[in-house]
Amino acid sequence: MSFLASTVDNYPGKTIICGGTTSQIIARELHRQIQIDLDIPIGDLPPSAKIKGVNLVTEGILTLGAVAEILENNPSLDSPPDNPAGNIVKRIRESDMIDLMVGTRINEAHQDPSLPWNSK
């Protein structure tokens, strides 16, 4: 089992995975299935998914961009939308501490020269 999968599987708190490739890697390494969740209205965002033992699984860049937009435009966070980005915001509001595990690999499918990138 990879370090990433082991960390997700043994994390003592709630877990969110953002990214289709990352979720596929976690599911493969943990020998679990990904189930797309079509019950939640999504609007412009790809649907969320489920992996046993993970609290929320979403697409990456589009969903995280929507999370940033929600946080920038609604600082009181009174009523986040009922979609994958809103669900991340709800979980942020419920949390006392947030640990982030962020990959640095560039996804060629989403290469955008306007996104920040650090070669270190």
Image (tube, helix red, strand yellow):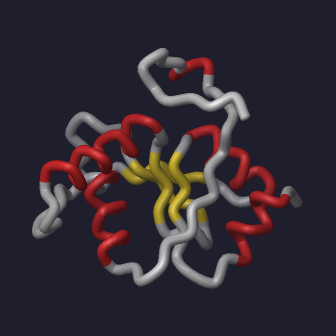
- When the figure is inspected, residue 115 is found, relative to residue 120, above or below; the finding is above
Judging depth in this view, the residue of 43 and 35 nearest the camera is 43
For the view shown, which residue lies furthest in the right direction?
A: 1
Judging depth in this view, the residue of 79 and 37 nearest the camera is 79
Q: Going by the image, does 4 lie left or right of 98?
A: right
Residue 54 location (% of width, % of height)? 57, 68
Q: Going by the image, does 11 lie left or right of 6?
A: left
Q: Residue at x 63, y 38 (%)?
A: 21
Q: Going by the image, does 113 lie left or right of 73?
A: right
Q: Residue at x 76, y 58 (%)?
A: 4
Q: Can you say which quadrant of the picture contains the C terminus?
A: top right
Q: Residue at x 68, y 67 (%)?
A: 8
Residue 79 location (% of width, % of height)? 12, 65
- Quadrant in which residue 43 is drawn: top left
Q: Can you say which quadrant of the picture contains the N terminus?
A: bottom right
- When the figure is inspected, residue 44 is found, relative to residue 16, above or below; the finding is above
Residue 114 location (% of width, % of height)? 42, 20
* Number of numbered markers: 0
